[in-house]
Image (cartoon, coloured by chain):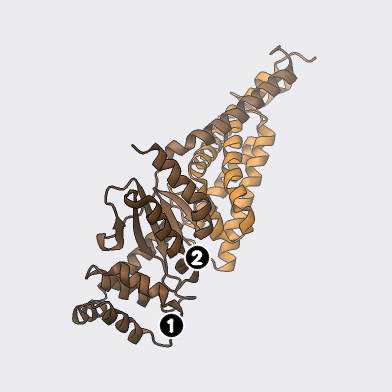
Chain colours: A brown, B orange
Amino acid sequence: MLRSRLYRRFVSGAVLVLLSAAAVAASGKLRRPYEPDAPPHRQRGAPEAPIRIAVFSDFQCPHCASAVEPLNQLEQIHGGKLRILFKYLIWERVHPHGRAAAAAAECAGQQERFWPYHDLLFARQMEWGEARNPERLFEDYARRLKLDLKRWKECRASHSALAAVDADIQEAKRHWVRSTPTFFINGKRYSGVWQLRNRGTAQIERELAKAP
Amino acid sequence: MRTQLAAAPPSKTALLGRLALAAVFIFSGLHKSASPEDFEAILEAYYILPQTHLSLFAHLIPWLELLVGLSLAAGYEVKLSSLASLGLLASFITALLYTRWRGIPLENCGCFGDWVHLTPWQAVALDLALAGAAVSTFLYAPGPWSLDRWIAQAEEP
């Protein structure tokens, strides 16, 4: 049979198509997953949890505010099997107060109050987001959460918080994270809340089913 | 046919060009297909394709690159494969130049997923060099060590 030209051409083509499909299927093993890390004050959940969700987010972005609820729901459903990490990614052209809000939250994090401050910023997003100068509101939130105001203000003045924010932004750029919110569930990327709800939750369930 | 093939100038340079072209396409295809979600994010950054088609292209392009790369490596339908590689390279160069023209800042081209970082201009230079290899592959097709020669040696029906 292999003596026929047509047959040789067909068999060779079919083998190459199958080989390329097999290479696509096997290429997942080559993957060097990007699993973002964050300082401890921007992490919550069980330290050894089998599922790690890193979220790149911007406090002034409305879509990011709408990601708070599904993340809380996932935490309620999966309890101690989930760890959530927060990463900053700010688009200053559209969200001019985003960087300052992130620095304010980072300084709250220095007093182990990042997550309450995070919740407050998202809950009050319209209030400070539309303010001409939101600094007074940021301070007000710090006061409401009973932060050590002197320490919080020193942190704001030191620019160390802004440096942490900018480091995250640079990291996001290096890894092609260009929209917020973007989630990495055990290194697998999901852009936006729709993908988190429709594809990310399925991955979590699959991985938890496999976990011992 | 056999006489024609024997008379074709055996060019080691063309063979090297074909194998180098194949290697780059295989390498690039493998790394893109390793994580279609990441490649989708790269495509999104170019602002060329509609959002609704990003996922389709993120799966299709790496597979095409692999198929073209493997075909070139094996020397199968060399003229067609080199033309396909030229088409792919032309679309990559166009996409890169388009982002420069629109002022879209890209720190790296994303041509090899997250593995090798080339600036857009380095990527254009590489693509132009590869286009040269594709042209020489086309001109010297099928060249030595190719399935096309083995196919041509078969009996006519």
| Residue A209 circle label | none
Which class describes the residues within 10 Å of circle 2: few (<14), some (14-19), or many (20+)? Answer: few
Which of discs 2 and 1 lies nearer the camera? The answer is 1
Give the answer, above or below, for where B81 lies relative to A182. Answer: above
Q: Which amino acid lies under the numbered mark 1 shown in the image of this protein?
A: Glu
Q: Which amino acid lies under the numbered mark 2 shown in the image of this protein?
A: Pro
Left or right of A152? Residue A180 is right
At numbered mark 2, what does the secondary structure look like: helix, strand or loop?
loop
| CA separation in Å, label 2 and label 1 | 32 Å
- Whether residue B109 is visible, yes or no, is no
Q: Which residue is denoted by mark 2 in the rendering?
A: B105
> In which quadrant is the C terminus of chain A drawn?
top left
Left or right of A14? Residue A101 is left
Q: Chain of mark 2?
A: B
Where residue B2 appears, as percent x and y from the top left, is: 72, 18
Q: Which residue is denoted by mark 1 in the rendering?
A: A127
> In which quadrant is the N terminus of chain A drawn?
top right
Name which residue lies at 41% across and 57% down. Answer: A174
- The mark total stands at 2
